[in-house]
Image (cartoon, rainbow, N blue to C red):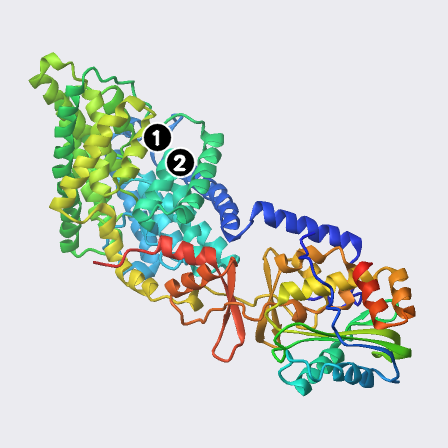
Amino acid sequence: MTAMPSPVLPSDAPLTLDLDVSGEFDAIVAVAESLREHPDILDHSAFVEAILERQNINPPLLGSGIALPHARTPKVKEIVFAVARCAQPVPFGDEAIPVRLIFLYGIPPHRVAEHLATIAALARKLRNQAVVDGLLAAPDPAAFFTLLRDS
Amino acid sequence: MSEPGNTSAELDSGTRRRVKLRIWLSDHLRINELQATLLWAAVIGLLGAWTSIGFKEATEWLHHAFTGYSGEHENYTESFRTMPDWRRVLVPGIGGLLAGMTLLFGNRFKAQANSTDYMEAVVVGDGNLSVKVSLVKSTSAWFSGASGASIGREGPLVQLSSLVASIAGRLMKFPLARKRQLVACGAAAGIASAYNAPIAGAFFVAEIVLGSVAMEAFGPLVISSVIATLTTRAHYGGEAMYAAPVFTMHANRELLPYLALGLLCGFGAPLFLSLMKAGERIFGRLKLPVWARLALGGLIVGALAVFHPEVAGNGRDLVFAVLHDPGTWQTLAIILGCKLIATAATFGSGAVGGVFTPTLFTGAACGYLFGVAASALLPGWHLEPGAFGLVGMGAFLAAATGAPVMAIIMLFELTLNYQILMPVMLAGVVGYYVCRSLNPRTLYSEALKRKGAAAVAQHLATLKVGDLMLSDPHTLPPHASFGEVARAFLQSRHEFLYVASGEKFLGAVSLHDIKGYLDQPELGSLLIARDVMREDFPHLQPGQTMNEALDTFGESDSERLPVTNAVGKLIGTVAKTDVLLFLAGKPRKPA
């Protein structure tokens, strides 16, 4: 394994617990909205466009109800992350796969190695059903991030 | 390149294991285009050797048919000695007639039939040899050689094995540089199997044909030479072609007469070349049709053979005789004179073949005669005239061909006599310099000039990236899943796979970027090619020069680079190996 060590995701990433939306589009727009003032995003609406465009090709889904909408775009200067937990499962993609956890991120185009390391580390953690169950049950953002970091 | 029927985006464990093996191999073996070229060089060596064996067998058969000689091996001196006078005249005459008719019916030669053909394949050109031209010339050389014309056989041997290589290169649709390299390998295989001389075969082509011993170009030549020699030896056995008695040097002062012999060969080689040209001029003045000219050339050789049957054939028996049983020096001098006239008549008449073996004999005979004279002048030095024969052979060859390295090695390989190597090196280099200062042209530069080598060199000097390009590269669509990307690497030898949408080049996925993540099947549903490709991947334009291409390769760790046109359309790829082969094998610019 040569994956570079990755912090997985910064603990100051905006987190919305109990997001109340009914569709994929609304969910993504809502999660992205939490990044509106982020200093590393150069053009917020273009950033959202990029994520939706990527979503159209093939929504990045991990089993167990987890979505990782993302975009490789020059509209961000650094990797930016936002997380949300939906109050009820939201159908994603053509097959209407129910999603409870959304990890949304944007990454600058030249950071290929970092991109792979980040997404691989996150996927490794979320492979563990106990971690996913813990995240779904976490009472507050601090507990959520602690579980993600320490698992 | 993505497999359309395969909807499962995830990687199964079997595929993962195979991709890991693939990565291990690429990390540890570094297989690239160059190694593939080596493999092809081996194939060409094998094919070239069999072509040569076939030609030799065919010549022997025809020789028997012409002369009725029933001895074990082709021996023109013996076969001509057993024939009555009228037949000695007639056989080379008829052979010349048939050779001329062959050229006549291969009508493309009407115009150039006048030109002496030392070696067609010396000009590798763009690696495309004409099948028709090569076959017509080889058939003509077959008639000439088998009927006792005073001509070497390496011409058709090299021609045919180069032709085989050229056909292989065309069938495989290799880019220009690799086709040239293959044809050069074919030539090396031809020389190596003609003379049982693998090292000289490789050096001959490197020195005379490519003018470079850069490893990119030299390595494949070595491989095909070795394979060709092994194949020939399996068929004919492995003795040296001119196994000679062992000579020993008794004192360092013996190098002095060898040095003098080197000087003599340096002066003699231009005379030999002038004699060949004089023969050409005289025949040119006769204004005869090509069949009559070749028949006349044959009749002259035949007429000489009535008195001295030794002049018939390429001169192999004569070289052997000089080394083992030279007879009196007076007889040898007369035979040398007759042989030179026969060779000039054969070449002058426009017969197709090589001048290599006649050159060897001229050198050996001159060396021997010089040795006789030297031992008469310096009786206390215990000089051996036979050793001078060997040294003369090497020095004369070095001077006449302008390839001293090849000549020194060739002499060693022909005789397998190590003791003689030092005097040959000395005399060969001296002979080379003397000859060069008197006459900048060599045996082969004449042929090169006539074949328009200058134009070829000029054309090659202006070649651009687009000329070395392989078209139709395999690409991945930007939406290919991570699993499809990994599987695509399994089917490709390359470290980078190109991503193109429609025909537009978008970037490249590096095997090394993704190799750490292949044990995570869940990534198959998260990532697509577009997510993990390098967008700033360097690419070339078809109009760039080779040096510009090399600079771009220097900045990249890729063995090949994509070529895009002005609007960013991916039109092909160029391999670093091809650029290096091209630069290593580029003919020198005409002076």
Q: Callout 2, which amino acid?
A: Pro
| Cα distance between the residues tagged 2 and 1 | 8 Å
Relative to B299, does residue B334 appear above or below in the rendering? above
Element class at badge 1: helix
* Letter of the chain that mark 2 sits on in the rendering: B
Q: Callout 1, which amino acid?
A: Glu
Judged left or right of residue B527, residue B296 is left
Residue B165 picture location, percent across and down: 45, 50
Image-quadrant location for residue B475: bottom right
Residue at image point 74% right, 50% down: B17
Residue at image point 48% right, 40% down: B50
Can residue B125 be seen at all in this image of the molecule?
yes
Q: Which residue is mark 2?
A: B198
Q: Nearer the viewer, residue B556 or B42?
A: B556
Label 2 neighbour load within 10 Å: few <14, some 14-19, many 20+: many
Judged left or right of residue B228, residue B375 is left
Residue B1 picture location, percent across and down: 66, 66
- Work out which quarter of the rendered image holds the C terminus of chain A and state it: bottom right
Residue at image point 72% right, 56% down: B518
Image-quadrant location for residue A62: bottom right
**Farthest residue toward the top?**
B380
Q: Nearer the viewer, residue B161 or B185?
A: B185
Q: Which residue is mark 1?
A: B413
Judged left or right of residue B252, residue B180 is right
Judged left or right of residue B323, residue B8 is right
Element class at badge 2: helix
